[in-house]
Amino acid sequence: MTACTCMFSIQCGPVVVLLTVLQWAGRGLPSPVRPICDPRVLDRFIMEARDTETALRGCKAGCGVTGTFVVPLTNVDFVVWETKDTEQQALEVQSGMSLFGQALGAVRESVSRVAVQILIDNNKSNIHSLGQVLRSLHIQDLPLPPAPAVGDLVTRKVSSLSELLHVHTNFLRGKVRLLLTNAPACQQNST
């Protein structure tokens, strides 16, 4: 028998098996997350937020939202926004998303209608997914803060579910879209 003619021969069997295992295991290595820059992804989140806002606009019974919620301002001063570096913009967006996550969590606990709870759960899930999208851009290594790092974030208070959802939709359409559109990882992909 010549060397390595048989896959399981005594002379080359262990080497071939080792190489096969290493090649198979190499396929399972995690690859770096590719940036998610397709604007249709954000459009989908915006559409779902707007649909929830529309569906719950007139919700009174079973939507007993009590209290006020701190949310980020959605208006953008473009001169100020463009003077911030991408990391500062990302921190502002992530802090805003954290505020929305907390507010929706509180709303979820206070509503009694299952259909409303499902819509709120979907929006909370979308906030988590948007956090993953932001992390895929590799702007900075920021986990979504458990308590919002408000810092320079300008906020306001809302006291109704419809107002909360309206501000959330506008935040996605404004600051989140600006961040995703101008993220360096997305600029590299478009060239």
Image (tube, rainbow, N blue to C red):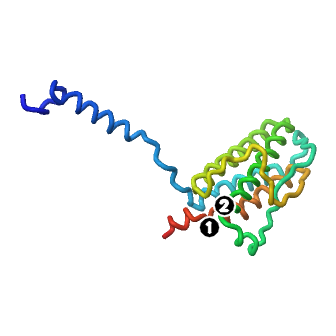
Disc 1/disc 2 C-alpha distance (Å): 12 Å
Q: Amino acid at mark 1?
A: Asn
Residue 96, by quadrant, is bottom right
Query: Where the N terminus falls, by quadrant?
Result: top left
**At x 71% / y 57%, what residue is drawn?**
91
Q: Where residue 108 sits: x, y (%)?
A: 81, 39
Taking 120 as reference, is 65 left or right? right
Judge whether 78 appears above or below 35 on screen.
below
Task: Tally the marks.
Answer: 2
> Toward the viewer: 18 or 158?
18
Q: Secondary structure at mark 1?
A: helix
Judge whether 20 appears above or below 92 on screen.
above
**At x 57% / y 53%, what residue is drawn?**
136
Q: Which residue is mark 1?
A: 182
Nearest to N terminus: mark 1 or mark 2: 2
> Toward the viewer: 94 or 46?
94
**At x 69% / y 56%, what residue is drawn?**
47
Q: Amino acid at mark 2?
A: Glu
Around disc 1, counting alpha carbons within 10 Å, would you say few (fewer than 14), some (14 to 19), or many (20 or more)? few
Q: Secondary structure at mark 2?
A: helix
Choose mark 1 or mark 2, whichever is in front.
2
Q: Which residue is mark 2?
A: 87
